[in-house]
Amino acid sequence: MSNLDLDICYLSASEALEKFKDKSLSPVELLTETIKRTEEVNPKINAFNFFRFDEALEEAKKSELKYVKGDISLPLEGIPLAIKDEVNIKGQPNRNGSLIFKDTIAESTDIDVESLVNSGAIIHARATNPEFSLTSFCHSRVNGVTRNPWNVDMTPGGSSGGSAAALAAGCTTLATGSDIGGSIRIPAGACGVVGYKPPYGRNPMGYPYNHDPYCVVGPLSRTVSDCAIMQNVMCGPHDDDIASLRPKKILPTTYERIKNWKIAYSLDLGFFEVDSEVEKNTLEAVKKFESLGATVTEIKLNWKQDEVNSVCFSHYANSFYGLISKLSDSEKEQLTSYAQMFAEVPELHMKAIQNNQKLYHKKIGAYVGYDVVESAEITGKMYSDLGPILNQYDLFICPTNASPAIKADIDIVNDDVIINDKVQQCADFSWVMSHPFNMLGKLPVLSVPSGFSSSGVPTGIQIIARSYSDELVFQGGYNYEMLDPWLNSNKNRPSISL
């Protein structure tokens, strides 16, 4: 594929929309090159598990005609969009990473993506996720292994791993994600793209997960401005979601400088073992913020690993692990090993609750048995530690992932995660630093790239602001990106090979 073709594949949505309007590029041309790129690299990274290229090209022709006529009223008219496999769109398959649902065709469209479906964006493929979006990796029995475009031996992260891998590889312009423990930010960090976890309620969702304060849906993109454009489409109140926030919050796509801002940062959130290369790249990011005229200060948090991880796993035992535990025995036999393991957690959790004790699950590396009040007490302590910092500073920064070098096909039931030559307690959560901010779900969190590790896999930082202050994290991320744009030339793009 020529450099010019790749340049088209890596156009931002904002650039593509401008080119559509001035007639220097058409939606058909963009989608055609995107399809070519997908056919070239998807066999190597396995980011997509379903394609609708013919239908998408017909839709692109209709978009092209609208631009010719000057009849443009939709915000994403003609932009290629990949949809995470867990999402229902009427008439499309939804395997949700599971053999159990390998032949399922959606009968309706989830409210999570209604606004995107109606935005003029062109859905050309569905992106892989692990079984039921359960883990921080991206492999399953039905989809196989999704790989990181920067190093195909490594994971792209999860659970929105296919979305992030496709963006990094130039196989889509925008992509959807969901986030109950970091599933947008983890793969964004591992693939060198942008991912946004909005505050709980900002983007409407369907039940039951709209009632889970840990759980949100959000955008993934290659630039901060694109992330804002997509977020503006996804957000707003919905009649079917009691938790959706009013009024709709529209973010700017360009921002003023952050000179004289006060920014706090932590390398470890009080308890994470953080890879030395991740630390180095985070400190380089700190220097960039200082060069923008911000004052940056390291702070210490008193968060504790056992409390954070155990409250999270107790919460998951009450929510989506509980759904798996209700499957029939024959269905459970079809599960991937990690899903079978997580299906055991609710029973252990309920036993612990009934006996008023905490029980340790060796494989997940955490205790279960925390009831709602105990969990709220710990979450409250966490916020009493971080809240004053967020009120004193404009932004708070920390790494997205504690380690970049995690194997694509890792078996978290039997394999260890090793960071700085130390075996970690929890294979699924030890290498990611995202889930504490699902516990504090009203905080906006933007993940942006911070550099590369020696394995070639990117690293990222999370930019956090006080509750519901979405515009602050975007203003910080936008200014940071302007210093050193990502994926804007061949030297900044993955060279994919097997």
Image: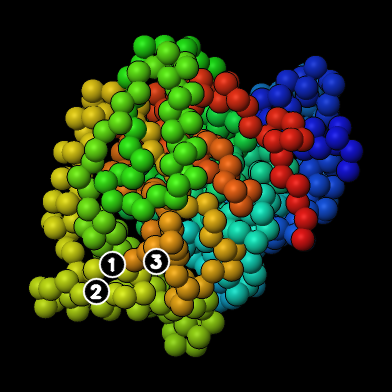
Looking at the rendered structure, the kind of residue marked 2 is: Tyr
> Nearer the N terminus, badge 3 or badge 2?
2
Looking at the rendered structure, the kind of residue marked 3 is: Val
Separation of residues labelled 1 and 2 (CA atoms): 6 Å
Please, is residue 144 above or below residue 111 in the view?
Answer: below
Closer to viewer: mark 3 or mark 1 = 3
Q: Which mark is residue 366?
A: 1
Binning the other alpha carbons within 10 Å of mark 3 as few (below 14), some (14 to 19) or many (20 upward) gives few
Identify the image quadrant of the N terminus: top right
Give the residue displayed 73% in from the left and 27% down from the top: 16
For residue 142, side relative to residue 347 (left or right): right
Please, is residue 116 above or below residue 424 in the view?
Answer: above
Give the residue number, with chain letter if any, for mark 3.
423
Residue 104's spot in the image, x, y percent? 61, 69
Identify the image quadrant of the C terminus: bottom right
Give the residue number, with chain letter if any, for mark 2.
360
Looking at the rendered structure, the kind of residue marked 1 is: Ala
Which residue, as the protein is rendered here, is positioned at the far bottom?
A: 330
Please, is residue 34 above or below residue 297 in the view?
Answer: below
* Element on which disc 3 rests: strand
